[in-house]
Image: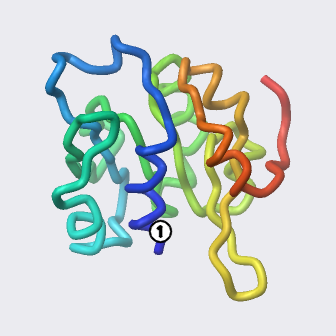
Amino acid sequence: MKAVFLVNFTKFVEWPPEAFSAPGSPVVIGVLGEDPFGALLDQAAAGETAGGRPLAVRRFRSLAALEPCHVLFIAESQEGRLAEILHLLRAAPTLTVADMDGFAARGGAVQFRREGGRLRFVIRPEAAERVRLKVSSRLLGLAGAAPGRRP
């Protein structure tokens, strides 16, 4: 389900024009750290578009390998480096997503969580706005209340 959510998030977020190197550039969904999705994310993104752009999936084993992407899922294997990662991305037009406890409170934009056996997510709109992303009111309406601090 998380893979499907990541793909669907791309349809409800608007990036600034400078987030793309060319008019036909893809919307890149990145995974930083140990990939929990395997082929599921590739399958969910196959043939999909967002804002008329194709989707591309890229995986980065380490922070040193990280390249610009539009949505970045930060794996639990990177929790010890979370402050460094969020600091590095503080001005990048990247929707940060994770399923770590307290991710939204620590500055992440979207946090997955389990409630009553169901997968839910919370969004910190100010985290997205800070990096010039516009999150659709439809997506915000589906999200739960995000705990956390104001920037």
* Rendered location of residue 37, percent (x, y): 34, 71
* Rendered location of residue 67, percent (x, y): 26, 32
Pick the residue in front: 149 or 126: 126
In the image, is residue 87 above or below residue 10?
A: above
Name the quadrant of the C terminus: top right
In the image, is residue 6 above or below residue 140?
A: below
In the image, is residue 23 above or below residue 56?
A: above
Inspect the image, locate mark 1, and give the three-letter code of the amino acid beneath it.
Answer: Lys
Residue 132 falls left or right of residue 104: left
Mark 1 surroundings: few (<14), some (14-19) or many (≥20) residues within 10 A: some
Q: Residue at x 43, y 45 (%)?
A: 11
Pick the residue in front: 61 or 148: 148
Please say which color scheme the image uses: rainbow
Q: Quadrant of residue 150?
A: top right
Q: Quadrant of residue 106?
A: top right
* Rendered location of residue 98, percent (x, y): 55, 56
Pick the residue in front: 119 or 102: 119
Q: Residue at x 17, y 28 (%)?
A: 25
Q: Quadrant of residue 51?
A: top left
Q: Residue at x 83, y 52 (%)?
A: 145
Q: Residue at x 64, y 23 (%)?
A: 129
* Residue on which the image places disc 1: 2
In the picture as drawn, the residue positioned furthest to the top comes out as 18
In the image, is residue 144 above or below residue 115?
A: above
Residue 8 falls left or right of residue 21: right
Pick the residue in front: 35 or 80: 35
